[in-house]
Amino acid sequence: MMKKILAKAYIGILLVLLYAPLVFIAVFSFTESKVLGNWKGFSTRLYRNLLTGDMQGNSSLLTAVENTLLIAVVAALFATILGTVAAIGIHNMTGRKRQAISFLNNIPMINPDIITGVSLFLLFVFLHISQGYVTVILAHITFCTPYVVLSVMPKLRQMNPNIYEAALDLGATPGQALRKVMIPQLRPGMVSGFILAFTMSLDDFAVTFFTRGTIGLDTLSTYIYTDARKGGLTPELRPLMTLIFLIILILLLVINLRQDRLQKKAEKI
Amino acid sequence: MKAVKRSAWALPYAIFLIFFVVLPLVLVAVYSFQDGSGRFTFSNIAKFFTDKDTLSTFAVSMEVAIENTLLCILLGYPAAWILSNRKLNRSAVTIVLFILPMWINALMRTLATAELFNMLGITLGKGTLLFGMVYDYLPFMIYPIYNVLEKMDKSYGEAAADLGATPWRVFWKVTVPLSMPGVASGVLMVFMPTVSTFAISEFLTNNKIKLFGTIIQENINSSMWNYGAALALVMLVIIGLTTLLQGKGDEELEGGVI
């Protein structure tokens, strides 16, 4: 009993510390002051500014949000396709070749962001490719795809290889067999790979920073960085972060509470 | 015939990897050994070993990274152990709560942490830097350890207990050794990223403490590509050595990352 209380208390303290800055942002999203930490009475004006897009010269924040989402969707989509096809190939490989490609696949995951960013920056400089949306998306595909490969591989291992062969024997074209037999079985792995890639892309700062060039392309991360260096964050970032946090909190709670309930039901049976 | 054909599906990705992973890393090495006009030189590497500022930044980065990693293990291991223990925690929601903050922009969280310190009247410096780093990286330590502990066969511990080991002894002789792979991947996810952070260290110390990542960024941004590349190469060598030591290099692809 004592052990249980101690354990609960320890987890509780860690969570309070972990969430303190987030609660801090959320509380100060309900006041108008320019600076975080300065309470000037309750107000929902920052929320109204954000939602109507009327932000005295800070409208580039919304562009940055759009860019972030656009880049994340495109990069995650390409990474999912590239990674799934690659996983099928790797699954059917053996020996040296398989080891080599597994090793290369690990590199972007082990490399810190700054190395990925700097090395790709040098690549684009070396090839005289002007940097912008395309280079950022290519860079994001580079560090996202390994996670897709790792998400799809276990599903391939669980799959019965004969089913695909059976479809071919029964007269399906390889394309049909892929679409109707393979993809449905790989879908859970592809979905979790996509989600992983999407969130990695959303959260990235260093790689975007080095590959965005000088055309003034901003994602949320680079926007916040530039803003903070200029001194003083755009106040509307506070309601924006609070809203993002709430959306993710609700999504995760719904998914996991449902899983919890299913699990408990299964335990009863 | 068919098997050959399907392994060829990895070809596009293999080409992609060579172009966007291998070639860029080769370029890091090439630029490191060139001067501004493209002639071969050792001066960039030599500069790293002789420049006092760079070396002291490097030493500080290593120190902060080691301290951060140790603190993360110290705080994260008990948390992972409690979370994986069915008697103490029956809900998957608690582990989700630990991962959730990672979805909020890291820079924004860091800035909020710094402001929180300001409001509480705590001067920004080494202490706040470490606190902020632990805050940013703790979930990366908890999650892999939790994963290993969760999947661990509980009967080993039970067997040890049946044979007369005290709970404390079971923990140190059975649980801890079996969970080492989790700790190792946690270290991998905390140590090098800490050395290479930029922005975070500046925000948390009011520009008082620079980490290695910051000087790489400064050099690249001020068009000192060759020296920047040399510094990146130094990091790459360290990463290569640590992964070799862990034997991660030739490990098979495994699922279950997050």
Image (cartoon, coloured by chain):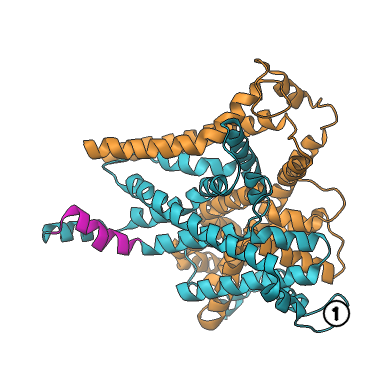
Q: Where is residue A146 shown, x and y percent of the image?
A: 59, 62
Tell which chain the image draws in cyan: B
Quick check: can you spot residue A262? no
Q: Specify start and end residues of the magenta stretch as a single range.
A: B165-179
- In the rendered image, which residue does mark 1 sit on? B38
Q: Quadrant of residue A251?
A: top right
Question: Callout 1: residue from which chain?
Answer: B
Q: Is residue B176 magenta?
A: yes
Left or right of B90 on screen, residue B37: right
Report the amino acid beneath label 1.
Gly
From the viewer's perspective, is B94 left or right of B15?
A: left
Q: Is residue B254 above or below residue A226?
A: below
- Count the labels in the image: 1
x and y percentages locating residue A223 in the rendered image: 76, 43
- Under circle 1, the secondary element is loop
Dot 1 crowding, Cα within 10 Å, few <14, some 14–19, many 20+: few
The residue at the point 33 percent across, 45 percent down is B82
Which residue is at a point 78% across and 35% down the rendered structure image?
Answer: A62
In the rendered view, tell whether residue A50 sits above or below residue A113: above
Residue A264 visible? The answer is yes
Check if residue B58 falls in the magenta segment.
no
User: Which chain did the renderer colour orange?
Assistant: A
Q: Position of residue B33 (x, y in %)?
A: 76, 80
